[in-house]
Amino acid sequence: MSKSRSELETEIARAQEELNEARRRLVKLRRRLPPEPVRDYVLKNASGPVRLSEMFGDRDDLILVHNMGEGCSNCTMWADGFNGVGHHLQSRVAFVVVSPDSPSVQGDFARKRGWRFPMYSAEGTTFFRDMGFQWDEEEFLSGYQPGVSVFRKRDDGTLVRVAKDFFGPGDLYCGVWHLFDLLPDGPAGWDPLFEYSS
């Protein structure tokens, strides 16, 4: 016997509440993780070397996106989305994007995309690997991985990482996938492109 629309809507509402409760539990668990000390890495931008501590500006907290660079259409889509909400984020915390691309490649790509957030290059550093966003070639999902690290600058100037997460299709950081999930056939194998025809 098939379920009625009303029964399915009730089941959907229950599943949504279970999902919301699981998310609240996840947030609480993440906040219980002990802070992880990190060194004051030196990355670079178009002006030259920049310390991780300088990226905070006058803020105590820094959200740093680990972006795989100009060759990744998924990372580009996430960055496009962050560009749209960057002013909201920056009203509360420092927000930057870091990729392994050189500063000149980053600058050209950011201009083409209209990105307004600060970008820094980890080119030639161990930053991605040390933060857990790069694996050796022979390992599963080898190479650079996209995600986010959240850092706090303590009163004594030391830096700690208080949270991290990985990005992937369907994650909580890109609404595109969730809107497609509302379609009868879901994303249906869709992948983001760098450009779309009008």
Image: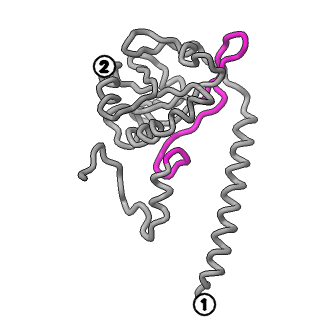
Residue hosting label 1 = 1
Q: Secondary structure beneath disc 1?
A: loop
What is the quadrant of the N terminus in the image? bottom right
Residue at x 64% of width, y 81% of height: 6
Residue reaching furthest to the bottom: 1
Residue 44 horizontal side relative to residue 178, left or right: left
Image x and y of residue 27, in percent: 70, 43
In terms of secondary structure, where does tag 2 sit?
helix
65 versus 155 height, above or below: below
At label 2, which amino acid type do we have? Ser
* Residue 197 against residue 89 in the figure, above or below: below
> Where does the magenta region start and end?
150-174
Q: Which mark is residue 104?
A: 2
Q: Label 1 is placed on what type of residue? A: Met
The percent position of residue 128, horizontal first and vertical second, equals 48, 25
Give the answer, above or below, for where 58 lies relative to 149. above
Q: Residues within 10 Å of mark 2 (few under 14, many from 20)?
A: few
Residue 54: name its quadrant: top right
Q: Quadrant of residue 142?
A: top left
Say which label, 1 or 2, has the lower sequence index.
1
> Which residue is at a point 48% across and 12% down the rendered structure image?
50
Return the x and y of residue 32 as percentages of the image width and height. 75, 35
